[in-house]
Image (cartoon, rainbow, N blue to C red):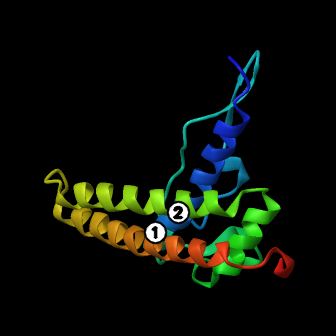
Amino acid sequence: MPPRKAVDRLAMLRWTLFQLVIGNSDAHGKNFSFLVHRSGLQAAPWYDLVGVVQYPQFSHDLAMAFGDEFNLDQIKAFSLADFAQRCAIDRQLLVRECRRMREGVRKHAMAATSSQSYLPGEQVLVDKIAEFALSQSDRLATLAEEASRISPDML
């Protein structure tokens, strides 16, 4: 298996954005794993994907800061620009991935909420998760656009 550095970096970026979209305040580095092959590492399938913000009994403070923010609601365009710079992510790639995430959330949230396979109590939770993810993905796409216009000198 050849080295997959670009593919795995993109997987890590998408994982990070998805955590913000679903409100997984408990996301941290130990929740991202790699498969080990003779030829090197490969990003493992994602796991432990929980929209913690849907559960008021648990802390919603981020387990790891995003930029300097530990509060999901306080993440702003500057936080995304700072994240991109620290991680050597092209900001136009960040914009494209946030847009892509938003489109995926729109498609799959609609499918999830219109499914007839949930019990009534489950349907309420699925609807709340979908509503939050739709709102967050819109917000992240907007913030990424704003972040792309922040001068690197400001970071």
Q: Name the spot of residue 76 as percent of width and height, x first.
A: 64, 81
Quarter of the image with the N terminus in it: top right
Q: Taking 116 as reference, is 9 left or right?
A: right
Query: In the drawing, what numbered circle is on residue 98?
Result: 2
Quarter of the image with the C terminus in it: bottom right
SS assignment at label 1? helix
SS assignment at label 2? helix
Query: In the drawing, what numbered circle is on residue 137?
Result: 1
**Residue located at (69% from left, 34% from top):** 34
Q: Is residue 62 above or below residue 115?
A: below
Q: Name the spot of residue 87 as percent of width and height, x first.
A: 78, 57
- What amino acid type should be assigned to the residue bearing mark 2? Cys
**Residue located at (54% from left, 59% from top):** 96
Q: Taking 153 as reference, is 91 left or right?
A: left
**Residue located at (62% from left, 57% from top):** 93
Q: Residues within 10 Å of mark 1 (few under 14, many from 20)?
A: many
The CA span between labels 1 and 2 is 7 Å
Q: Nearer the viewer, residue 115 or 105?
A: 105
Q: Taking 111 as reference, is 88 left or right?
A: right
Q: Name the spot of residue 45 as percent of width and height, x first.
A: 55, 37
Give yes or no for contact between labels 1 and 2 (Cβ–Cβ under 8 Å): yes
Q: Nearer the viewer, residue 92 or 57?
A: 92
- What amino acid type should be assigned to the residue bearing mark 1? Ser
Q: Name the spot of residue 50 as percent of width and height, x first.
A: 49, 58
Is residue 11 visible in the rendered image? The answer is yes
Q: Nearer the viewer, mark 1 or mark 2?
A: 2
Q: Nearer the viewer, residue 79 or 150?
A: 150
